[in-house]
Amino acid sequence: DQQVKQNSPSLSVQEGRISILNCDYTNSMFDYFLWYKKYPAEGPTFLISISSIKDKNEDGRFTVFLNKSAKHLSLHIVPSQPGDSAVYFCAAITQGGSEKLVFGKGTKLTVNP
Amino acid sequence: GAVVSQHPSRVICKSGTSVKIECRSLDFQATTMFWYRQFPKQSLMLMATSNEGSKATYEQGVEKDKFLINHASLTLSTLTVTSAHPEDSSFYICSALDGEKLGEQYFGPGTRLTVT
């Protein structure tokens, strides 16, 4: 049973436009969510996170939105740049638990110049 | 930011041999480290949780006798793939938990294992 789902395996956007990556989760115990960016043959790097007590967190070009009632979060990248091309993983965790990250399958973002 | 290293970055070994992969936290102490495996076109799969000074906790379906994990110090965890087979070829990634920063794990650069 996949607890964190990224239903779009790939996304292609034009440079300068907005990229929206979506993530859904099923476990209501998750209360902290993270986005990681991964280039081929490298480990993931942390991008941005959000606690369940918030519905929005912004860091530069990256904004994460959380809709708890829908168990849905999204990552917005504005404006998108070719260097943003990578695989983006959504992850969830239960605070005070085992600290195990539960990952989605990832969405490959391609930003075209 | 915190840095986690892995060694080696890539290794090729023959079927039946064992390979050890090291994961080090360079500027913080990590009481907990995680080992992941990434298959092509698939997500990261958590293999086991490594706690300093105690036995690792393996995820369901992961053979603990095949993937030996040792977390002997607060900065080092090792994964040994024993009697490797071609199907063990994969990209192995470790992460280290900084206990002072909730939820954030710092990932190593990964190790590409190829078993011939």
Image (tube, helix red, strand yellow):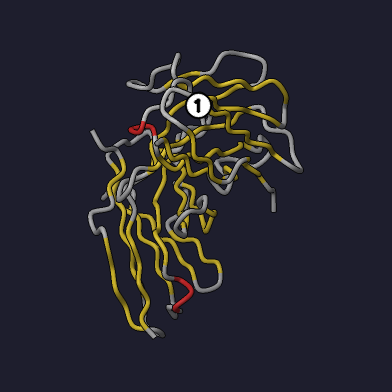
Q: In front here: A71 or B25?
A: B25
Q: Provide the secondary structure element on which disc 1 rests.
A: loop
Write the residue at 61% across / 36% down: B97
> Could you say where residue A93 lies in the image, as x and y percent from the top left?
45, 38
- When the figure is inspected, residue B87 is found, relative to residue B51, above or below; the finding is below
- When the figure is inspected, residue B35 is found, relative to residue A39, above or below; the finding is above
Q: Which residue is mark 1?
A: A98
Asked which quadrant contains residue B53, the reply is: top right
Asked which quadrant contains residue B44, the reply is: top left
- When the figure is inspected, residue A25 is found, relative to residue A41, above or below; the finding is above
Asked which quadrant contains residue B103, the reply is: top right
Write the residue at 63% across / 28% down: B77
Write the residue at 40% across / 68% down: A76
Along the horizontal axis of the image, is B105 left or right of A25?
right
Image quarter in which the C terminus of chain B is found: top left
> Could you say where residue A31 lies in the image, as x and y percent from the top left?
44, 40
Q: In front here: A55 or A38?
A: A38
> Could you say where residue B36 lies in the image, as x and y percent from the top left?
46, 36
